[in-house]
Image (cartoon, grey):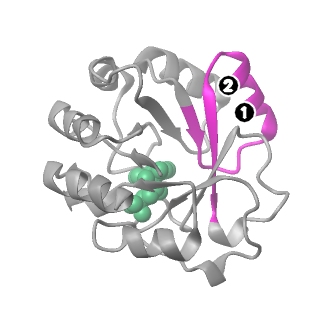
Amino acid sequence: MFVKVCGLRTPETVDAAVESGADAVGFVFAPGSVRLISSDDAAPLVARVPDEVETVGVFRGQPIDEVLRLARESGVGTIQLHGDEPDDHFARAAEAGFRTIRAISAARFTASGHTGGERLLIDATVPGSGTTFSPADLPVPPTVDWLLAGGLRPDNVAALIAAFGPSGVDVSSGVESAPGVKDPVLIRAFVVAARS
Ligand SMILES: O=C(O)c1ccccc1NCC(=O)[C@H](O)[C@H](O)COP(=O)(O)O
């Protein structure tokens, strides 16, 4: 089970995710997010992540040149796009040497409508809102490996993994003590529960 902890903004919470055994850590560069971090502030956090842990920059509806600039400045290795970006944005990111994730809401998921990204993440309608969805909300079941996001918490992640059968999970608000404030204790509990 691949585990990504998203929306990190402090050394303590990056370390908690890494030490808990998370496979990926995420930094949100999407304007308007309560988890927004600048590339200058993200760079030293990315630098403390060991090579074996994936570093993901999260973007929504931004020009691809801005996405690539922020990704390079921060040093992340993966670009996650949340805004129905066209396939050529993913191609540009891949050409520039980044791994990619296409994030799509459950309601908009179709068997053929998630092209472009190297990997697929299916989320609730509003990313980072802590809202869950059910398998019945997926118009069709995914036939490729995918990451589940949307309202996951330490106390529900095991049941939702059982219900959906994803290959990985992604969490943000479910490991926060207040909007945008990650809690190291909840991060550790989430990783343990996802792997249980
Ligand atoms: O987290 C945000 O604020 C955000 C804003 C804009 C685009 C994407 C965003 N987050 C992307 C993520 O990967 C979140 O981890 C995912 O939506 C799950 O969030 P949550 O339901 O809070 O666990």
Q: Does the image show residue 103?
A: yes
Q: Nearer the viewer, residue 84 or 3?
A: 3
Badge 2: how crowded within 10 Å, few (<14), some, or many (20+)? many
Give the magenta range.
79-105
Does dot 2 land on a helix, a strand or a loop? helix
Task: Tell me the tag on residue 146.
Answer: none
Label 2 near ligand 1 (CB < 8 Å): no
Which residue is depicted at the point 51% across and 23% down? 77
Which residue is depicted at the point 28% across and 56% down? 192
Describe residue 141's horizontal placement relative to residue 23 as left or right.
right
Give residue 83's position: percent from left, percent from top: 63, 49
Does dot 1 land on a helix, a strand or a loop? helix
Q: Which residue is mark 1?
A: 90
Q: Is residue 49 magenta?
A: no
Quadrant where ligand 1 appears: bottom left
Give residue 99's position: percent from left, percent from top: 62, 28
Give residue 38's position: percent from left, percent from top: 35, 28
| Residue at the front extreme of this rendering | 196
Quarter that holds the C terminus: bottom left
Cβ–Cβ under 8 Å for marks 1 and 2: yes
> Residue 159 falls in which quadrant of the image?
bottom left
Q: Does the image show residue 128?
A: no
Above or below, 108 against 34 in this view is below
Which residue is depicted at the point 31% across and 40% down? 21
Q: Which residue is mark 2?
A: 93
Which residue is depicted at the point 22% across and 58% down? 189
Q: Is residue 90 magenta?
A: yes
Q: CA distance from mark 1 to mark 2?
A: 5 Å
